[in-house]
Image: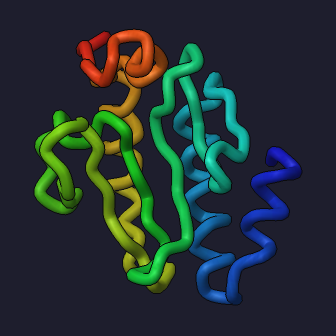
C-alpha cells in the first residue's frame, strides 16, 4: 500500500481505520493498474491520470466517492450535485460495506469514465471517455 495512504488510514479513529483499510484493499485488488496517491488531502486512485475512486473522512462518516458514479445508475450511491458525474456512499461501520456492491462499482468505474483530467482545459465541461 502507498505509504501516504497508509499514514492517512492510520490517522483515523479505530472503526474508521478499519473501513479505510478494507476500502483500500478492495480498490487495490480490483484496480491493480491504478495509480494511487493522496490528492486534495485524501486517498484517490487514477486510471491514465483520471480520478476514478477515493475516500475521505467527513462528518457523516467515511465517504467513498466515484468520480463517474452518477452514470453507474446504482441506487445505493448518492448523487449530491447536478454539475458533475460523481456519486458516493458513506460508511460508519465495517459491517455496512457490501463487498459484492463494492466490486460491482469498481468494475463500473473502469468501464464508465468521464474526463476529469481535462476539466480545467475544457472550462468545467465534462466529456465521457468510456
Residue drawn at 25 percent across, 19 percent down: 125
Q: Residue at x 18, y 38 (%)?
A: 83
**Frontmost residue, 48 versus 101:** 48
Does residue 84 appear anywhere in the picture? yes
> Relative to the observer, which residue lies in front, 32 or 39?
39
Question: Where does residue 12 sit, x and y in percent of width and height?
Answer: 70, 79
Which x, y percent locates residue 74?
Answer: 15, 49
Task: Tell me: residue 115, above or below residue 107.
Answer: above
> Is 14 left or right of 129, judged from the image as shown?
right
Quadrant holding the C terminus:
top left
Q: In this rendering, does residue 95 appear at all? A: no
Q: Residue visible at 32% across and 64% down?
A: 89
Q: Nearer the viewer, residue 77 or 97?
A: 77
- Most foreground residue, 98 or 73: 73
Q: Position of residue 90 (x, y in %)?
A: 37, 71
Q: Is residue 11 above or below residue 53?
A: below
How many numbered tags mark residues here? 0
In the rendered view, how is the structure colored?
A: rainbow
Query: Is the residue 21 above or below the residue 65 in the image?
Result: below
- Which quadrant would residue 24 be assigned to in this image? bottom right
Q: Image point 41% across, 60% down: which residue?
A: 99
Image coordinates for residue 37, horizontal then vertical, percent: 72, 40
Outermost residue toward the bottom in this view = 14
- Picture quadrant where residue 45 is located: top right
Judge left or right: residue 18 versus residue 123.
right
Amino acid at each position: 500500500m502507498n505509504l501516504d495512504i497508509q499514514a492517512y488510514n492510520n490517522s483515523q479513529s479505530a472503526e474508521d481505520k478499519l473501513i479505510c483499510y478494507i476500502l483500500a484493499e478492495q480498490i487495490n485488488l480490483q484496480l491493480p493498474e491504478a495509480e494511487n496517491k493522496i490528492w486534495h488531502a485524501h486517498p484517490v486512485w487514477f486510471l491514465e491520470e483520471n480520478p476514478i475512486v477515493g475516500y475521505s473522512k467527513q462528518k457523516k462518516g467515511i465517504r467513498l466517492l466515484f468520480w463517474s458514479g452518477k452514470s453507474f445508475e446504482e441506487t445505493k450511491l448518492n448523487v449530491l450535485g447536478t454539475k458533475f458525474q460523481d456519486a458516493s456512499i458513506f460508511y460508519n461501520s465495517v459491517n455496512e460495506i457490501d463487498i459484492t456492491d463494492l466490486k460491482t462499482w469498481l468494475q463500473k468505474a473502469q468501464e464508465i469514465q468521464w474526463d476529469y483530467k481535462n476539466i480545467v482545459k475544457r472550462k468545467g465541461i465534462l466529456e465521457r471517455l468510456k
